Image (spheres, rainbow, N blue to C red):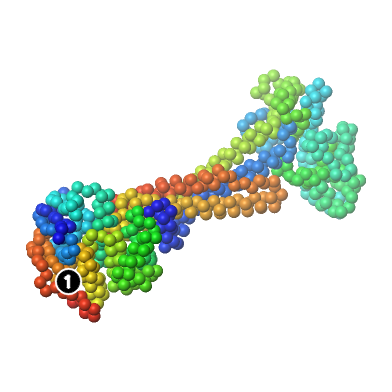
Amino acid sequence: MNLIENITHVAQTLRRNKVRSFLTMLGVIIGVMSLIIIVSVGAGAQSLIINQIKNIGSNLIGVLPGKADPDGPPASVMGVVITTLTNADIRALVSPDYPAIVAATSYVKGVDTITNNEQKIDTTFTGVSANLPEVEDTGVAAGRFFSAEEEAGMARVAVIGSEVAEKIFSDADPLGRKIKIKKVNFTIIGVMKKRGSASFQNQDNQIYVPVTTAQKLLLGIDYVSFARLKIVTPDQVDPAMDYARRILRERHRIDNPSDDDFDVRSMASGLAAITAITNALKFFLAAVGGVALIVGGIGIMNIMLAAVRERTREIGLRKAVGAKNRQIIEQFLLETVMITFIGGLLGIILGALISFAVSRVAIGLGYKWDFSISLGAIFLGCSVSIIIGLASGILPARRASRLDPIEALRYE
Amino acid sequence: MENLIAVKDLHKDYVNDGVVTPVLRALNFTIEKGEFVAIMGPSGSGKSTLMHILGFLDKLTTGEYIFAGSNVAIMDDNQLAEMRGRQVGFIFQAFNLLPRTTVLDNVIMPLIYTAIPKAERIEKATAALQAVGLEHRLRYLSNQLSGGERQRVAIARALVNDPAVIFADEPTGNLDSKSGLQIMKILQNLNEGGRTIILVTHERYTAEHSKRILRIKDGEIVSDEKVEKRQFAAEGEELRK
């Protein structure tokens, strides 16, 4: 009997026990399916995170207050308020002596109910420097952004995101209208271009005011919570980081780098950290899928052992009509491998469908999500299912082949 | 006539937990090609064990078993499997058909372990089923048949590889007398056609359908006689028990 005939023969046997064959497959289906989903959704999520960061720009440097820990998150993320970084520090980094840093902006944030005469919305306002459009590579859709003079003079002007404009003013032209933030009147001088989401923040839901105005009039602080520096080209990022550290140490009178009270980070290092985290997550989820496959494999072995017992007479008969031990092993091993292989194929199809659905949902929610099923994942799914078939089938198959035909024929 | 089977001083012992139980003792006989021999004896006499050894399903402990000139005692498992596939066909009391499998597939089964091409296998299986009068049941599932029909399928399966000997172990034991008679008639017809048949039974009347009876008791042959008044299973007659 050649392989193809063998396969059709085994397929007949499996068809005779449809429900049992399917239940036997279920472990492999679930295991391979989770493996495919993990690999595909993991890659999609990674692409989402990387796209979010790339939307901000890869030639940017972030400056954060607080001691640097290269492997951990910035101190400010933990909710610690650190007051050591000032707007003057950031302004000092942009100088004709070091043209690689072309622009810089500070950020401070606050939350308030923003009102005009008719509408109220709860949102965040952000105090930024006048050259935010240059740093973040954006601009206004209508009106203008505030100037350096307005920033220096603590002008009460605001530039709003397109969504805020829609929410507060509906169809009316917001330019020249007033809004109240913390009981202070601001004149709207511009509306930002639509930008979508970046760094997991909706960029269209922002209200920008001059950083000095935000510090003195709205928040009563003299520090900034974050700053971004724009570097002329990505290859200048590393030297610019060294330069920024040196200037900040001079200004803060720090001799020993381990005493730094600030943290200078590039997007690249942020990307590397996030890639490391998502890779670890993928590995963890793949391990969960692997455990599901092992459990499935043990289940199959168990069922095949029971099948050998149940089919003892059949095995005895096959031996009586001339089947050799090797042929019995082949038959049972092929049965297990076919069960796991078909289960693997079904798992791949289901996993791909679910991953596709996840990507549709993510895209529907406005995220940039790349859907992909890698050939590697499919190959892995197929080969893992075959290996599980072989591993879980060999013991039952050997047991079947070693049955004494006389005993087997007498078996009740 | 030439000797198909020659047994010399055959012994078979079963060893269980170190206790040796002799089952067959010093058996000597020959069976020629074309004979119809009944091995007869009460249960526990060793007749089934003898059939298993003659049918290459079991190994003898000491002695000699020559089948068509080959020494079976020195064969390994694979060679014995080869002999079972080519030289013998079995008919069992309990039919031993594959459930939920078509009649045709049941009969083809011995051939799937040979190199015979698929089309020829179907041809041979159909011919074997014709020989037992079941050519109209090819696509039936084995569990849709009556007991007598099932045993006829089992005979077709035993015939399909054109074996030198057919071993029938209590072939009428699970059948009503009419069906049992049909089976005996088929076996007699096959023997008339030149096929060697070895029948194992504990019933004298069934044994009398053969041409020669080897009586076995406590593992020894107590008589080896030609059947003087042979029974012929004619149409319409009921098999007495």
Relative to B224, is A267 above or below? above
Residue A386 seen in the current view: yes
What residue appears at the point 18 percent right and 52 percent down from the top-left corner? Answer: B69
Q: In which quadrant of the rendered image does the C terminus of chain A lie?
A: bottom left
Question: Which of these two is toward me, A25 or B193?
Answer: B193
Relative to B166, is B16 above or below? above
Q: Chain of mark 1?
A: B
Left or right placement of residue B19 versus residue A198 in this view: left
| Secondary structure under the numbered disc 1 in the rendered image | loop
Question: Which of these two is toward me, A4 or A168?
Answer: A4
- Name of the residue lying farthest toward the right: A176
Q: In which quadrant of the rendered image does the N terminus of chain A lie?
A: bottom left
x, y (%) of residue B198? 19, 63
- Name of the residue lying farthest toward the bottom: B236
Left or right placement of residue B170 versus residue B104 in this view: left
What residue appears at the point 70 percent right and 39 percent down from the top-left corner? Answer: A53
Label 1 neighbourhood size at 10 Å, few (<14), some (14-19), many (20+)? many
Q: Amino acid at mark 1?
A: His
x, y (%) of residue B17? 18, 50
Question: Which of these two is toward me, A382 or A391?
Answer: A382
x, y (%) of residue A46? 63, 42
x, y (%) of residue B5? 16, 57
Question: Which of these two is toward me, B212 or A174?
Answer: B212
Q: Quadrant of residue B44?
A: bottom left
